[in-house]
Structure formats: C-alpha cells, structure tokens
Amino acid sequence: MTTIKCRGVEFPHIQAILFDKNGTLEDSEAYLRSLAQKAARLIDAQIPGTGEPLLMAFGVNGNLLDPAGLISVASRRETEVAAAAYIAETGRSWFESLKIARQALEEAEKYIGKTPSPLFVGSLEVLQLLSQAGLKLGILSAATTQEVQEFVANHQLGGYLQLQMGVDEGPSKPDPLLFLQACQALGVEPSATLMVGDAVGDMQMARNAKAAGCIGITWIGKSDHVQGADVVIHQLDEIQIVEA
C-alpha cells in the first residue's frame, strides 16, 4: 500500500486512485463551450427565444464556461433532460422536447468534430508516476463510457489505467453507487481508494461511498467548486508519493 500526500495532507494505505475526466485530466473547456453554443443555436433556430436561457442553463456566459455548470459536470442524459425542460416550457410535448434536445446535441457534436481536447499539463506524468508505484488507476467520469474510451485511446493512456468508466444508462454523480461499482471493478475497497475531481459531485460521491479521501482540483483557483474535498490542489503534480 502507498501513502499519498498533497499540500501537507497524507492519505495512508492507498491502493487505487480514481480520476474524473473533464476538467481534471482533460482541458475540455473550449470543446464544451462550443458544444453548448452550437446546441443552443440549433434549438433556438427551431424554437426562437430559447437560445439565451439555454446557454445560461448550460453554464456559458459569452466566452466563459462555468466549471460547475451543467455542460461541465452533468451526464449526457442529464444535459438532454435539462435542455428538454426549457423546450417543454414553450408548450411542446415532453417526448418531442427530449427528441429535439437529443438531436441538437448530437448534431452539435458532429459539427464541432472529434478533435481531441488536450491533457492538462502534468496529467500524463502523474499517471505514469502513480502507475509505476503499483497503484491501480481509473477514470470515473460523467461522460459516456465511449467518450472515456476515446479520450484514453486518443492520448494513449491505456497502459496506465485499469478502469475506463463513464455514465450511460445507470446512476450518475453524485450517486455513491458509481464509486462503489468502480472500486469493485478494480478489486479494491473504497476505504483504500482516493477520488480526484473538479466538482462538488465528485466529492459528495466519494464521501458517501466512504472513500479514503477526496482531492479537489481547481485549475482556476476557485475552491468553492470542490466543497467537501479533504485537500484542494491547483496542479496534478501536487499529488505526491510518500512511500510505496
């Protein structure tokens, strides 16, 4: 077992670390902002007047993306449902509203393309270091499992990760069941597993699953986005190995 240290806080007897993807390992701000803007325009073209409220709901203000906003932290299904709720307010039926929201997001994805978002500086090196120390590593993201797998393949991270898990039809963050399922898949106890994420949902999920600890990362320095974290860092290389 390994002791992990961040900013003076030590987590002993660690066997595994789970990482969020968007905003933690992957600098996906530009992609998510573009996705929200395109989807909102597509919906507004069909239902005028919905574009601006949708952008606010997505967490986009001009060229700024709220890292705690809907498009940043919600699952794909949750994003569709939230967008559909705005559409339904105009008098459309619920199933029609869901269809419009789903099609707009799918079309927006095709329009933007699949250019991979970059890794945050230090992500690869930290994964390499932790993997070499014998820790089991995984990604536990609100993105779909397919998106997680594509991210791992694009950045050739498969050699360092034993788990690539997203949210599909089942529960979403902050449901602790996700964390418990991830730990079971890795063959480790939650009490020996750390969670690293950039959102309150990551912290709540891990805490409710009785994780060994929660490391909040905020690249923009706003620690309120990771309330509930045992320690808050601003770069991944602040995750250090004390002993292995």
Image (tube, rainbow, N blue to C red):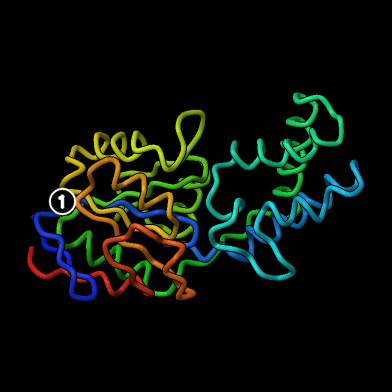
Asked if residue 123 is positioned above or below residue 159 in the image, the reply reads below
Q: Measured from the top left, where is residue 185 in percent x and y?
A: 27, 35
Image side of residue 142 versus residue 103, left or right: left
Q: Identify the residue shown where x is 81% and y is 36%.
A: 89
Q: Measured from the top left, where is residue 15 in percent x and y?
A: 15, 51
Residue 184: image quadrant is top left
| Mark 1 element type | loop
Q: Measured from the top left, where is residue 3 in percent x and y?
A: 11, 63
Q: Quadrant of the C terminus?
A: bottom left
Q: Measured from the top left, where is residue 211 in percent x and y?
A: 23, 47
Asked if residue 169 is positioned above or below residue 28 in the image, the reply reads above
Q: Nearer the viewer, residue 89 or 132?
A: 89
Total numbered labels: 1
Image side of residue 243 versus residue 116, left or right: left
What is the three-letter code of the residue carrying label 1? Answer: Gln
Image side of residue 177 versus residue 6, left or right: right
Q: Nearer the viewer, residue 152 or 206?
A: 206
Q: Identify the residue shown where x is 31% and y is 34%.
A: 181
Check disc 1 and report the residue beneath it.
Answer: 15
Asked if residue 97 is positioned above or below residue 165 in the image, the reply reads above
Residue 114: image quadrant is bottom right
Classify mark 1: residues with Cα within 10 Å, few (<14), some (14-19) or many (20+). Answer: many
Q: Quadrant of the N terminus?
A: bottom left
Q: Identify the residue shown where x is 31% and y is 70%.
A: 125
Q: Identify the residue shown where x is 67% and y is 40%.
A: 82
Image side of residue 230 versus residue 135, left or right: right
